[in-house]
Amino acid sequence: MLETAREVLAGEEAWVVGGAVRDELLGRELVDLDIAVQDPERAARAYAKRSGGAPFPLSERFGAWRVALEDGRTVDFTPLTEPVEDDLATRDFTLNAIARPLAGGDAVDPFGGEEDLRAGRLRAVRESVFEDDPLRLLRAVRLEDELDLRLDEGTERLVREHAALVRRPAATGGSTSSACSSRSAGRSPTASTASTRPTTAS
C-alpha cells in the first residue's frame, strides 16, 4: 500500500496521518492507510488505476476520497492543510495526531502522541474535542478497549462532562473523521471549515 502510494505521489507533498501512523508505531498490520495530499481526487484516481481498486468520494463537502481494494483494505485521501501541524491540531487524540512524510523522514508529533502511546495513555488534543464531534466519545471507548489504553485524567473529565452529547450528531452534520471511517483520526469539523483551504479523519 505504502509503496504504491509513494510511486503515485512521487514528487508531491503528501503525509501519512492518523491511525496509520499510530498502528505503524504499535507494530500492527497496516490495514487502512490515510494520506493527506493537495488534490485528493486526483491522487485517489491515480492510486486506483495503479492498484486496481475502486475510487469514490467519501464527502463532497470535505473533499475526501477513498480507494477500496479487493482484499478489503482501504486508502483514504484527504485535503492537506499547510503546515501539517495545523491539520494535526484538528484531530481527536494525540496518538492520532502524528504525521509522517509519505516519501520518508521524521514524524511530526506536536502533541506528544508517541510518548502517550508508549505510556498506554489516551489523551485529547484539546478541550473542545467532544463538542466538535460527539462521536469521538464512542471512539474513545473503542480505542481504550482495542489498544488497551487508559484515559488520562483530563480526558476522562472531558468524557464525563460531555457524555450526554453522544445522543446528538456533530454540529456541522459530520466531520471528516466520521465520513472517512470510524477507525480514523479525524479532524474537527469546526477547525476544518475554518481553514483557508477548500472545505474538507479520525
Image (cartoon, grey):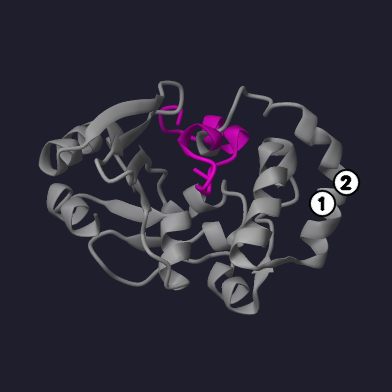
Q: Residues within 10 Å of mark 2 (few under 14, many from 20)?
A: few
- Magenta part of the protein: which range? 178-202
Q: Which residue is mark 1?
A: 158
129, 83: nearer the viewer: 129
Residue 91 percent coordinates (x, y): 57, 49
Left or right: 58 in relation to 184 = left
Residue 154 percent coordinates (x, y): 81, 61
The amino acid at mark 2 is Glu
Q: Identify whether 143 is placed above or below 109.
A: above
- Is-magenta flag for residue 192? yes
Left or right: 165 in relation to 148 = right
Mark 2: secondary structure:
helix
Residue drawn at the location 41% of the way across and 21% of the way down:
60
The amino acid at mark 1 is Leu
Quadrant in the picture for the N terminus: bottom left
Q: Identify whether 201 is placed above or below 146.
A: above
Q: Residues within 10 Å of mark 1 (few under 14, many from 20)?
A: some
- Is-magenta flag for residue 197? yes
Mark 1: secondary structure:
helix
Left or right: 109 in relation to 50 = right
Mark 1 and mark 2 residues within 8 Å of each other at the beta carbon: yes
- Between marks 1 and 2, how big is the CA–CA gap? 5 Å
Residue drawn at the location 49% of the way across and 43% of the way down:
201
Q: Which mark is residue 104?
A: none
Residue 45 percent coordinates (x, y): 19, 32
Left or right: 46 in relation to 173 = left
Q: Which residue is mark 2?
A: 161
